[in-house]
Image (spheres, rainbow, N blue to C red):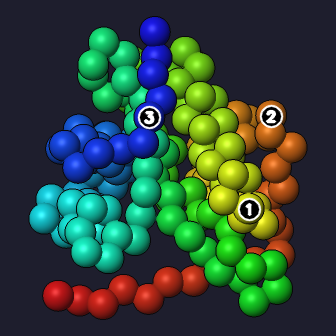
């Protein structure tokens, strides 16, 4: 049986393992540079910037949905889903649906205007999964980022 709950600080090592698994899946195994200290402080420190739900089977974390608040001058607060990760052995077992449903329920409970997230254009399984939710895929906006060197 899968249990969905809010993440706790003690979950961070298992969550970081999932993040590394995602980086490998996304063909960027060396891409994760956040330290455990930064990850923990960002989620559970004095000024937390993210929250998450985790999925457990037999007291082992097998998935997570990490989110944070986003603000639109047009729509107000919304939830940004940074990562929805399910470990490889659990994919196709409904874990992702449980996590996404919990995240959507949380956004509605908080009265947010909606949710936003990204999906890689080559990730057909994820795209097909998200289409089941009557999502809108943006064809008008491009992703832009600026990275600061250490």
Tag nearer the camera, 2 or 1? 1
User: Residue at point 32% right, 76% down?
Assistant: 47
Asked if 113 appears above or below 83 in the picture, the reply is: below
Residue at point 19%, 43% (across, down): 10
How many dots with numbers?
3
Q: CA distance from mark 1 to mark 3?
A: 20 Å
Q: What residue lies at 78% left-to-right and 66% top-to-bottom?
A: 113
Q: Residue 24 location, x and y as percent? A: 32, 44
- Crowdedness near tag 2: few (<14), some (14–19) or many (≥20) residues, C-alpha within 10 Å: few
Q: Position of residue 91 (x, y in %)?
A: 50, 22
Q: Find residue 100 and report its horizontal and vertical position in percent.
A: 62, 39
Q: Nearer the viewer, residue 96 or 72?
A: 72
Confirm whether residue 126 shows in the render: no
Decide: marks 3, 2 in contact (CB < 8 A)? Answer: no
Residue tagged by mark 3?
Answer: 5
Q: Nearer the viewer, residue 62 or 3?
A: 3
Q: Which residue is mark 1?
A: 111
Q: Is residue 22 above or below residue 132?
A: below
């Amino acid at each position: 049986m899968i249990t969905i709950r809010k993440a706790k600080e003690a979950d961070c090592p298992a969550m970081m393992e999932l993040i590394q698994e995602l980086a490998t899946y996304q063909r960027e195994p060396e891409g994760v540079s956040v330290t455990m200290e930064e990850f923990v402080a960002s989620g559970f420190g004095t000024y937390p910037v993210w929250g998450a739900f985790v999925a457990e089977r037999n007291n082992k974390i097998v998935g997570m949905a990490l989110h944070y608040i986003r603000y639109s001058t047009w729509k107000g607060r919304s939830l940004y889903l940074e990562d929805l990760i399910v470990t490889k052995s659990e994919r196709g077992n409904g874990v992702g649906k449980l996590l996404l449903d919990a995240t959507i329920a949380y956004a509605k409970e908080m009265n947010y205007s909606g949710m936003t997230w990204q999906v890689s254009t080559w990730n057909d399984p994820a795209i097909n999964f998200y289409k089941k939710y009557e999502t809108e895929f943006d064809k008008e906006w491009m992703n832009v980022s600026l990275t600061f060197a250490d």
